[in-house]
Image: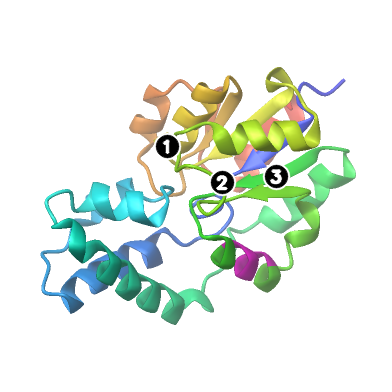
């Protein structure tokens, strides 16, 4: 008997190998506007948040009137490299296996609705996910509303739900929603930071995540 019925995936850094592209887009956007860019570590830390929250966290001293222009330049640079992004190796077969095994699958991401829909169409993964939530639908992580709404839509209880993500924002959202979490350390946040949030497990690869799910999911 399966421990979980619903598995919710973060997108950037968990399903898609996009962390480096996001960091580069943030830094390039800052340079366009003559703003001192955040370090790689600082930029990686805000991955997973909605764009507005991400920029405010990365550059908290920036005058509020400058964030809209920064967001526009970020979108420009991110979209320039969007078509070159790839899924992490093994993700598509994993989603196919989970679907075949009867799991319900969802997405909870800091991407915009347009960005998520574009990514789902480009990767061909849309058919695996019965419902998705993004930054246009709900408050930014770690607020639990994305998970609350997904559980309600799927009619699945918290103790039957698992959140999988590569950032502390994902893990804190799971805590706030009262659901279990599985961390992956191949994305944006360092392994030590992920382990500090006490997930059920921290996988270093998609293959390791798949092996854990086969044993404990």
Q: SS for tag 3? A: strand
Q: Colour scheme of this structure image?
A: rainbow
Q: Kindly identify which numbered label has been placed on residue 169.
A: 1
Q: SS for tag 2? A: loop
Q: Is residue 154 magenta?
A: no
Counting residues from the start of the chain, the first of labels 3 and 1 encountered is 3
Report the residue at 74% width, 61% height from top: 126
- Report the span colored magenta: 116-120
Q: CA distance from mark 3 to mark 2?
A: 9 Å
Location of mark 2 (residue): 10
Note whether 167 is above or below 109 in the view shown.
Answer: above
Q: CA distance from mark 2 to mark 1?
A: 10 Å
Q: Residue 111: percent from the left, percent from the top? A: 50, 57
Q: Is 96 or 179 nearer to us in this picture?
A: 179
**Residue at far bottom of view:** 80
Q: SS for tag 1? A: helix
User: Could one spot residue 216 in this view of the protein?
Assistant: no
Q: Residue 158: percent from the left, percent from the top? A: 68, 21
Proximity of marks 2 and 1: CB atoms separated by less than 8 Å: no
Report the residue at 66% width, 39% height from top: 8
Q: Residues within 10 Å of mark 1 (few under 14, many from 20)?
A: many
Q: Residues within 10 Å of mark 3 (few under 14, many from 20)?
A: many
- Image quarter hosting the C terminus: top right
Note whether 68 is above or below 217 in the view shown.
Answer: below
**Residue at far front of view:** 65
Location of mark 3 (residue): 106
Q: Residue 130: percent from the left, percent from the top? A: 78, 48
Counting residues from the start of the chain, the first of labels 2 and 1 encountered is 2
Q: CA distance from mark 3 to mark 1?
A: 17 Å
> Magenta: predominant secondary structure element?
helix
In the image, taking residue 92 as reference, residue 32 lies left or right, namely left
């Amino acid at each position: 008997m399966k421990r979980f019925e619903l598995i919710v995936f973060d997108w950037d850094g968990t399903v898609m190998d996009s962390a480096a592209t996001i960091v580069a887009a943030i830094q390039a956007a800052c340079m366009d506007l003559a703003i001192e860019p955040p370090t790689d570590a600082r930029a990686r830390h805000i991955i997973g948040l909605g764009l507005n929250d991400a920029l405010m966290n990365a550059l908290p001293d920036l005058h509020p009137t400058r964030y809209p222009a920064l967001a526009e330049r970020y979108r420009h640079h991110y979209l320039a490299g969007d078509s070159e992004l790839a899924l992490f190796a093994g993700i598509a077969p994993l989603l196919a296996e989970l679907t075949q095994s009867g799991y319900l699958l969802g997405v909870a991401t800091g991407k915009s609705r347009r960005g998520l829909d574009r990514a789902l169409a480009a990767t061909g993964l849309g058919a695996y996910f019965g419902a998705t939530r993004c930054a246009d639908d709900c408050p930014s992580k770690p607020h639990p509303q994305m998970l609350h709404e997904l559980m309600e839509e799927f009619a699945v209880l918290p103790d039957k739900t698992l959140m999988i993500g590569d950032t502390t924002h994902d893990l804190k959202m799971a805590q706030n929603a009262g659901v279990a979490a599985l961390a992956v350390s191949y994305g944006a946040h360092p392994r030590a930071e992920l382990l500090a949030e006490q997930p059920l497990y921290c996988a270093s690869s998609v293959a390791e995540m798949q092996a854990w799910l086969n044993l404990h999911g």
